[in-house]
Image: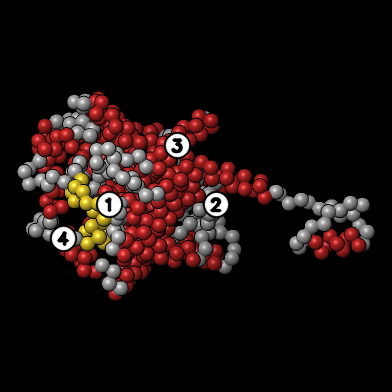
């Protein structure tokens, strides 16, 4: 008579059965390694995306060979190349994942624009680095995410990685402000820049804004079956990120974040939107006003937004001069522009004499230096000057199509809090009964995040352009927006999309 004694709840019945002289057959539990293997297999396709996002926590390092911040190859850049290769191998091995015709047309349009600008450039060889960078950010990374993300669970995992990155960078930025170890701003080293350094003062504000928009989206529309604390936790994250965003002193990021938040609140519904807005405003008042977190400097920066026409500061004057130079380049080559990476070459021939020779940078571990002004700090004017009307139409048209398709799909999911079903589902979940995913708006939170992030980027491009380590994250953002706009799994029922309720 052979039996196997086990520990735990089954040990008592087994012992009693042995004493009674009966044969006991026990079932061995599944080995923990098997469960770990299944978990890794479930998340394997999306892990390169998460790694690419989290590697932006690594300090950016020094400047590139030209003295600027745009020529550095960071760990996140290397990870993005591995991500694209991983996607290609996955697609070739499976032989079943492909883009829909609409997705292929929208995502291929920028590639056509970049190729046309490179071929028609006066210096095609000099345009090659720009062509590779543009294709990486605006074509390869978005396509890779559309092909790799299989469900809303994968989308949320990437979104949570973005939020984690924002919290880390934001904490570093607040510490820099509090200890006076940030980048130089108005003669004081108090500007929060995170690990991106003084050469990329917009990097941390961009990352923090991405995280804030993501947290707000999931606070407005938590995943089906999420625990009761989920919404409160998301709101706390959004409120906490207001502090590093404020001490980044980035006017463009402030404006873009405010408009993106308003769009998401409008798409959610008035009642819930007003409650969430009240919480965020109260948090902002306490942290920025009541606690005195940079209130004087922030107030001066806010007032400068309304003075950009009457009494602009030096940075605004230089920006206007570069915008005029970009428009002048386009007038000289209206169809295809001056070529990729052509703005710095042609800048002096088109800019006014009032343009500064460079921008002063200092602090956050870097010595004083003057950085050359290599772009107009307006993505649309950069496209217009370097790629002409053809490039601007194809690239900006692609973004507009992504936004239109994303908003249309989001509208079809129904407004959270506006139907009785959503309320009944929430009450059923609180009562501990099973919640049917089919009774809730599929992927509402993912849709809000995708639309909000894309709105943020489109608005921010009015005051900024690509450049620096955080550019890789822009490609990931566009990939999330494209996945929501075109992937069938984005709004499929949980069973069909392999979406686990409440899972990442």
Image point (12%, 47%), residue name: 356
235 lies left or right of 253: right
* Labels 3 and 2: the sequence-earlier one: 3
Q: Does the CB distance between marks 3 and 2 fall below 8 Å?
A: no
* Looking at the image, residue 260 lies above or below residue 397: below
Q: Which mark is residue 236?
A: none
* Numbered tag placed on residue 500 in the rendering: 2
- Mark 3 lies on a secondary structure that is helix
Instruction: Kindly identify which numbered label has been placed on residue 366.
Output: 1
Whether pointer 2 and pointer 4 mark residues with C-beta atoms closer than 8 Å, the reply is: no
C-alpha separation, residue under disc 2 versus residue under disc 1: 46 Å
Place of residue 340 in the rendered image (x, y in percent of width and height, measured from the top left): 23, 32
Point out the frontmost of discs 3 and 1. 1
Q: CA distance from mark 2 to mark 4?
A: 47 Å
Mark 2 and mark 4 lie on one chain; the one further toward the N terminus is 4
**Label 3 vs label 1: CA separation?**
30 Å
Gap between marks 1 and 4 measured at Cα: 27 Å
Q: Position of residue 449 (x, y in %)?
A: 39, 53
Crowding near pointer 2: few (<14 within 10 Å), some, many (20+)?
Answer: some
**Which of pointers 1 and 4 lies earlier in the amino acid sequence?**
4
The residue wearing badge 4 is 304
The answer to which of 65 and 207 lies nearer the viewer is: 65
Please provide percent x and percent y for residue 326. Answer: 15, 39
Look at discs 2 and 4 and give the one toward the viewer.
4
**Residue at x 55% of width, y 52% of height:** 500
> Element at badge 4?
helix
Residues 465 and 406: in front is 465
Label 1 neighbour load within 10 Å: few <14, some 14-19, many 20+: some
Identify the mark nearer the N-term, 2 or 1.
1
Which circle's residue, 3 or 4, is located before the other in the chain? 3
Mark seen at residue 82: 3
């Amino acid at each position: 008579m052979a039996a196997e004694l086990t520990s735990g709840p089954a040990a008592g019945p087994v012992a009693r059965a042995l004493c009674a002289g009966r044969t006991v057959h026990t079932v061995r539990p599944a080995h923990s390694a098997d469960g770990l293997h299944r978990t890794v297999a479930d998340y394997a396709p999306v892990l390169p995306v998460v790694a690419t996002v989290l590697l932006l926590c690594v300090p950016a390092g020094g400047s590139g060979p030209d003295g600027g911040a745009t020529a550095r190859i960071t760990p996140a850049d290397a990870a993005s190349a591995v991500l694209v290769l991983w996607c290609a191998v996955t697609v070739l091995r499976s032989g079943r994942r492909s883009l829909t015709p609409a997705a292929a047309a929208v995502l291929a349009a920028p590639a056509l624009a970049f190729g046309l600008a490179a071929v028609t450039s006066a210096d095609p060889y000099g345009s090659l680095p720009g062509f590779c960078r543009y294709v990486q950010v605006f074509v390869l990374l978005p396509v890779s995410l559309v092909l790799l993300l299989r469900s809303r669970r994968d989308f949320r995992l990437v979104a949570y990685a973005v939020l984690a990155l924002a919290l880390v960078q934001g904490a570093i930025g607040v510490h820099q402000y509090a200890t006076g170890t940030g980048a130089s701003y108005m003669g004081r080293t108090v500007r929060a820049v995170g690990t991106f350094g003084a050469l990329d003062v917009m990097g941390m504000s961009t990352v923090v804004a991405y995280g804030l928009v993501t947290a707000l989206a999931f606070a407005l529309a938590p995943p089906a079956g999420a625990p009761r604390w989920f919404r409160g936790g998301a709101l706390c994250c959004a409120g906490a990120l207001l502090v590093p965003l404020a001490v980044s002193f980035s006017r463009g990021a402030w404006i873009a974040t405010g408009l993106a938040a308003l769009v998401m609140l409008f798409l959610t519904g008035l009642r819930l939107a007003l409650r969430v807005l009240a919480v965020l405003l109260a948090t902002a008042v306490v942290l920025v006003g009541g606690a005195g977190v940079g209130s004087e400097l922030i107030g001066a920066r806010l007032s400068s937004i309304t003075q950009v026409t009457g009494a602009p500061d030096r940075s605004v004057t230089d920006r206007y001069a570069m915008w005029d130079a970009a428009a002048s380049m386009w007038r000289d080559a209206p169809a295809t522009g001056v070529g990729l990476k052509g703005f710095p070459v042609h800048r002096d021939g088109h800019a006014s004499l009032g343009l500064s020779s460079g921008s002063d940078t200092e602090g956050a571990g870097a010595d004083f230096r003057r950085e050359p002004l290599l772009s107009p700090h307006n993505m649309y004017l950069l496209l217009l000057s370097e790629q002409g009307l053809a490039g601007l139409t194809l690239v900006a048209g692609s973004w507009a199509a992504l936004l239109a398709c994303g908003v249309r799909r989001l509208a079809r999911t129904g407004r959270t809090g506006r139907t009785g079903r959503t309320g009944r589902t929430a009450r059923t979940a609180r009562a501990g009964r099973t919640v049917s995913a089919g009774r809730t708006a599929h992927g509402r939170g993912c849709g809000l995040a995708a639309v909000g992030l894309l709105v943020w980027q489109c608005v921010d491009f009015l005051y900024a352009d690509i450049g620096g380590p955080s550019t890789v994250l822009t490609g990931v953002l566009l990939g999330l927006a494209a996945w929501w706009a075109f992937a069938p799994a984005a709004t499929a029922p949980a069973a069909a999309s392999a979406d686990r309720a409440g899972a990442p």
